[in-house]
Image: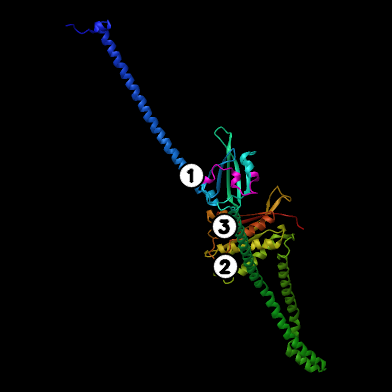
Amino acid sequence: MSRPPSLRDKVGVVPEVALELGHLQEQVWVEVIQKMEQVYSDLIRYEIGLEEKNARLEEAQAFITSVLSSMSDVLIVCGLDGHVQQVNQAVLEMTGLEAGALVGRPLEDLLVEGSRGALAEFSTRPSTAVLRECEVRLLCADGGASDVVAMNCSLRLDHRGRPEGTVLIGRPVGELRRAYAGLAQAHADLKQAQQTLIQQEKMASLGRLVAGVAHELNNPISFVNGNVHTLKKYMARISQYLDAVGRDDPQTCAALRRTLRLDAILADVPELIEGTLEGAERVTDIVRSLRRLSFAQPGASEVFDLAEVVQTALQWTLKGTLKGAAVMPSLHVELATGLFVRGQAGQMHQVMTNLVHNALDALEGCGDPVLDIVGGHVDDPGLSPPCRVRVTVRDNGAGIQPEHLLRVFDPFFTTKPVGRGTGLGLWISYGLVRDFGGSLTVGNHAAGGAIFTIDLPAVNNP
């Protein structure tokens, strides 16, 4: 029986070489297995990455779909051939059609006859980047037409910047027109309310003015009235004496002259007449001031002394406002002479009345109220003549809160309780001073209280 062939017989090599070859084969297989494991791991990692990207893509797709579905404006996406590629829910609700009945159709098939024109031409041959405010009507499922839609059409580009189609976005004009109508009505109501409040503020200023004028007129009129009654009594005595003189009875006339005290009457008559004339002149001056302060001629402009207007406004406002007040404020008024400015004296009177009244309101509840009004000239080389007229109105009240300083001159802004103010007095004053070519500023004084400053261009003495 023969023996099986040995390794030497088969390969013709020594056993040591055969062992080395087997070891090499083993290493090759290990490397192959390692490569396969690495490839398998890479495949698993790539698969996980693809799944994550797919999930994010689905989320992005769902987000875009929800946004498109939630849009109240209609959205139509077309290709370069003018065929519809996508629409949003607003289009479906407006037309009553399904998305399958719209996608793939030419855009002009979705438009009512007479509404195609420039929009359909733009969707197939866009010549510009944007087509704005093209009013169209869409065909509905029942064959009718939708409301007018204001459509904007823009060019859609691919990732290389080449034209890929068009995007059309529109909103029903009826909705816009209703919104505009509502806005216009709200604006008209606001203007009406503003005019009403301005008139109320003017009436309040007029009321304060009338109260001051009534108090100012009361003194001279009462004086004149008393003098006239005295003169009436004197005239009765003089008439009685003249009747006796007419009867040519010297003794009776002499006795009657002593009884009626005609000598004292004759000595008193010139003073009564002088006092009456003085009261009448005072009334005339007040009426002249009222005529000068009248707003009946809005275009009239004159040169006037601001110091006189300030004094008149202060006097009338104090008498009309502080009647019956528990504590009278201490007044410090220092006004230079010759504070001539150009404009309407009545308007500046209203400004000063508002500022003084505002200061008096700030002094309510103050233990030692002080109202300080100073007026004079300040240098300003940029003007001709090179000076300005400056008037400051300061109180020693609580001052103005820092957060309110920037809003003091805003219309309707007020810190007073309901029924005490409209918030228009300072706003109107700010506008009137600006019409004079000047400025009205506000701040808190270092010693306490608020201070308002009026700067106006000075003019030469007329």
What distance separates the C-alpha of mark 3 from that of mark 1?
A: 60 Å
Dot 3 falls on a residue whose secondary structure is strand
Of the residues shown, which amino acid type is indicated by label 1? Thr
**Disc ID at residue 65:** 1
Dot 2 falls on a residue whose secondary structure is loop
Residue bearing the label numbered 2: 328
Which badge, 3 or 2, is on the more N-terminal residue? 2
Residue placed most toward the observer, 226 or 140? 140
What distance separates the C-alpha of mark 3 from that of mark 2?
A: 18 Å
Looking at the rendered image, the quarter that the C terminus falls into is: bottom right
Circle nearer the viewer, 3 or 2: 3
Q: Local crowd at mark 2 within 10 Å, few (<14), some, or many (≥20)? A: some
Splitting the image into 4 quarters, where does residue 447 fall? Answer: bottom right
Q: Is residue 238 above or below residue 32?
A: below
Q: Local crowd at mark 3 within 10 Å, few (<14), some, or many (≥20)? A: many
Residue placed most toward the observer, 428 or 400? 428
Of the residues shown, which amino acid type is indicated by label 3? Ala
Which badge, 3 or 1, is on the more N-terminal residue? 1
Please provide the residue range marked out in magenta. Answer: 99-118
What distance separates the C-alpha of mark 1 from that of mark 2?
A: 74 Å
Of the residues shown, which amino acid type is indicated by label 2? Met
**Disc ID at residue 450:** 3
Q: Residue at x 35, y 27 (%)?
A: 40
Residues marked 3 and 2 touching at CB (< 8 Å) = no
Q: Is residue 399 above or below residue 1?
A: below
